[in-house]
Amino acid sequence: MDRNPISKQRIVHSVARGIITGIVLGTVFLAGFVIRGQMPVTAQEVVDSHFPLLEEVKNLLHDNYLREIPPDKNLEYAAIRGYLGELNDPYTFFIDPPVAQSESDVLAGQYGGIGVQIQRNEYGQLVLYPFREGPAVEAGIRDGDVLITVDGHEIAPDERLDVVDRMLRGEVGDGRGVTVTIERANAGEIYERFIEFAVVMVPSVIWRTLPEEPSYGYIQIVRFTSRTPDELREALNDLELQNVIALILDLRDNSGGLLQESVEVASEFLDGGVVFYERRRNNETATTATEGGQALEYPLVVLVDNGTASAAELVAGAIQDRERSILIGQRTYGKGSVQLIFRLSDDSSVHITAAEWFTPSRNALDGNGLEPDIVMIPDENGRDVELEEAVRYLKEELAANASNE
């Protein structure tokens, strides 16, 4: 490690290298982040910048400070954070290498566990929906199976879903796993299984028909990844084969993802037209959906909540503004700004706000979010009242359409 006193020039050298590296390598757009490869200033202009006061303070510390001075790299990171903090923008920030790597792992969409989605049914029970490729489905877990115990721990009606989810995850290898007691859906059969942990690729799209209304297709988009458009088309093909007559699109707790992929998703529900406007310093552009989407004819309801953010808000906002569907749930998060991600030379990264989004009706998302057409108060016991309301609404719509024919 370089032991010379840190200078602001070292900081700007690092940032300059990062800008160049970001342009060459690029990363991905997550929850409002995107690489565009444009430099607001030249690399040489950044390098030539000079901040003498910082250098002066550094030298004074080096010569006079009583206690041990932290490593140069720590001080450099702190200086960058302070520099960005003065912008008073929560979405422009610095990430050191370990956290940046963790962010990349999240984007990879994988973890060690048994591979299930957990939801609470109308009776307060936790039910499992295994991923189509994963240890749980290989062990015989079926959609709707009720989870009774995990490693002997009885699952209480008020057990938090995130706590149970962590119980079903763990380090892969050496026979590590979990023993679960399951009640077979609609059969009353109780059985026990030991399921060994494996590396699970988390799907970005989860779908099924609803057990109470098998003619209704339920599609949850967890995040927008490079696989999402293909997974959505697979979901729509499968649900079409099951003769569904209506769709529920669940964007709750979807914090965003890849921008272009979110536009492709919107295109399956919108037959062309504007998806969103993007406004930068000196210009505004409109992004439109492609025509001929696969889900244009289905009656549709979209579920949102305060965890619906960024690219997910773009999709929901376009569907709402274009009157393709109503929104049911809670006001969305309100993340309507665009960040460029630059990977720096030591594998840290910096996120810089560069633009903001507007819905087709030119409503600003940032700090506002989307107001649902039907606002729901979450059930304190975890019952999915939003999904129940979506089913009720679709029944009324289908009945009204039938009476008008």
Image (tube, rainbow, N blue to C red):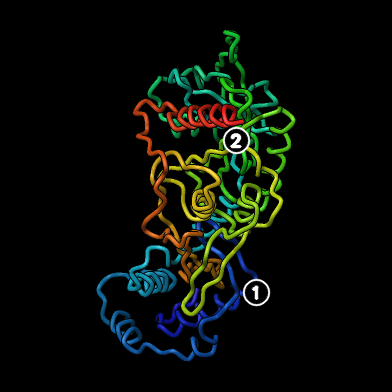
Res 295 → quadrant:
top right
Picture residue at 58% right of the left edge, 19% below the top: 145
Q: Please, is residue 81 above or below residue 304 in the view?
A: below
Picture residue at 42% right of the left edge, 70% below the top: 77
From the viewer's side, name the closer residue of 301 and 151.
Answer: 301
Picture residue at 59% right of the left edge, 52% below the top: 107
Q: Earlier in the sequence, mark 1 or mark 2?
A: 1
Task: Report x, y in % for residue 102.
Answer: 53, 53
From the viewer's side, name the closer residue of 191 and 119.
Answer: 119
Q: Please, is residue 144 above or below residue 39 in the view?
A: above
State the mark number for residue 24. 1
Outermost residue, top direction?
188
Res 58 → quadrant:
bottom left
Callout 1 crowding tier (Cα within 10 Å): few <14, some 14–19, many ≥20: few
Callout 2 crowding tier (Cα within 10 Å): few <14, some 14–19, many ≥20: many
Task: Report x, y in % for residue 277.
Answer: 52, 65
Q: Amino acid at mark 2?
A: Leu
From the viewer's side, name the closer residue of 233 and 105.
Answer: 233
Q: Please, is residue 371 above or below residue 14 in the view?
A: above
Outermost residue, front direction?
404
Give SS at disc 1: helix
Task: Report x, y in % for residue 199.
Answer: 65, 39
Residue located beneath label 2 in the image: 247
